[in-house]
Amino acid sequence: MSLTDVSDLEPLLQPYGVRSTRVSPLAPGRFRVDTSTRSYEGRVVSETSAISRMSLADYAAHRQFRRTQRFLLTLYHDRFVPAGEDHVFYLTDAWVGPPLNVSFRDVMDGIDNLCHLHRAVEGYRASLPTDLFSSEDRSDRWLEALQKGARWLGVEKMLGRAKENERLSEWLTKWEDLAQASIRHLVSAGYKEVARVWRASQEIAWNQYRLSNLIRLRNGRMATLQSADPVADTRLYDLASFCQDICARGHADGVIEAVEQYAKQMKITPEEKAIVYAFTAFPHQAFAVVRSCPSVGDSSPERWVVKAQQQYSVARTLLKQLERRGRMT
C-alpha cells in the first residue's frame, strides 16, 4: 500500500475522525499528516511491533515518563487499525523541533532524560502477561555482532571494490584495526561474565535512543521519539547508542561526560563502563560508508572521509583511556 497521498490515507484516518490536508513522507512506513488545526504522525508497522511499542510507552507513562509519543485513540476507542497484510496503522501527535546536538547542555539533558526513561521502564518485562520478546535475548550478543562486523571489513578489503579505491582501502585497514582493538577491550572488560548478568536481569532497551530521535520542543522541553521496537537487551544499549552518535560527530569529551553523568544517577559497574566505551569505539558507520562510497573517478567531495576521521579520533581516545585504566588495575 502506498501511503504518500491523501486519498491513500483516508481509509486509515477515518476511524480517528481526521481529515488530512497534506501528507509528508518522513521515512518508509512513517509520515506526517497535517490538518487545518493539528498535526499528527502516522506509522504502519506489524501488529506485533505496534503492541510492543504501545505497551512499553504506556508502561513508562504510568511510571511518570510522558515524554514520548503515545498511541491516540480512534473514535471506537481502539489504539490502532488494520492496514492489510498483517500490518496496522497507528497515529500519534507530531512533535516539532530540532533534534539534540552535541553541545554540553544537549548531551547532559539527553542523559538525564535517558535515566528518567530507564527508571520508568524497570520491571517492564516481568510485568508482561505474555512474553512479547520471544526472539533470542540480545544482551549477550554484542561480542558476536562486533566480531562478525570485523570479519566483514576484512573480507570487503580483500574482495570488495575497495581494491580499486585506494583511499577506501586504506580506511578499511584502519577500521579493521579499530574493530579488533574494540573487541579486545570488550573481552578484557569481562564481557561474557557481564553479559550473563545482563541476561539474567531481563532488562529492556528502548532501542534507537539517538540524538536524532530526541526533539527540543518550543517550550524547551525534550520529546523522545519511538522510532523502533523495544528489544530484549541490557538498558546500557541505549547509553551505548547515544554515545555512538556523539563519537561519530567527533566529541570524545562528550562521550566521557555522558557516561559519567549516567553513572551518577544509575547503577553501572566499572566493567560496564569499559564495555560501553569499547562498543562506542567500534567503527559502526564503516558499513554504510562502504555501501554508499562513490565509484572510482566520481568527482563528488568525499565527505565521508571527514566523518570517518572524526569518529576514528574519538575512538582512539576512548581506547587509550581503557588502556590506561587497564594498567592501573
Image: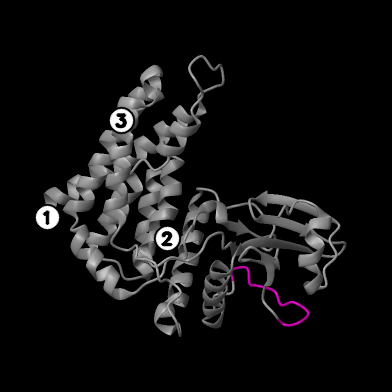
Residue at 24% x, 40% y is 180
Q: Which residue is mark 3?
A: 174
Q: Which mark, by number, is residue 238?
A: 2
Which amino acid, by three-letter code, is at mark 1?
A: Thr
**Between discs 1 and 3, the one toward the N terminus:** 3
Which amino acid, by three-letter code, is at mark 2?
A: Asp
In this picture, which residue range is highlighted in magenta? 67-77
Callout 2: helix, strand or loop?
helix
Say whether residue 144 is left or right of residue 52.
left
**Which residue occupies the foreground of this view, 221 or 32?**
32
Q: CA distance from mark 1 to mark 3?
A: 28 Å
- Quadrant assignment for the N terminus: bottom right
Q: Is residue 210 magenta?
A: no
Q: Which residue is mark 1?
A: 329
Q: Quadrant of residue 81?
A: bottom right
How packed mark 2 is, by other alpha carbons closer than 10 Å (few <14, some 14-19, many 20 or more), is many
**Is residue 66 shown above or below 304?**
below
> Can you see residue 90?
no
Residue at 39% x, 61% y is 261
Which amino acid, by three-letter code, is at mark 3?
A: Lys
Q: CA distance from mark 2 to mark 1?
A: 27 Å
**Between discs 2 and 1, the one toward the N terminus:** 2
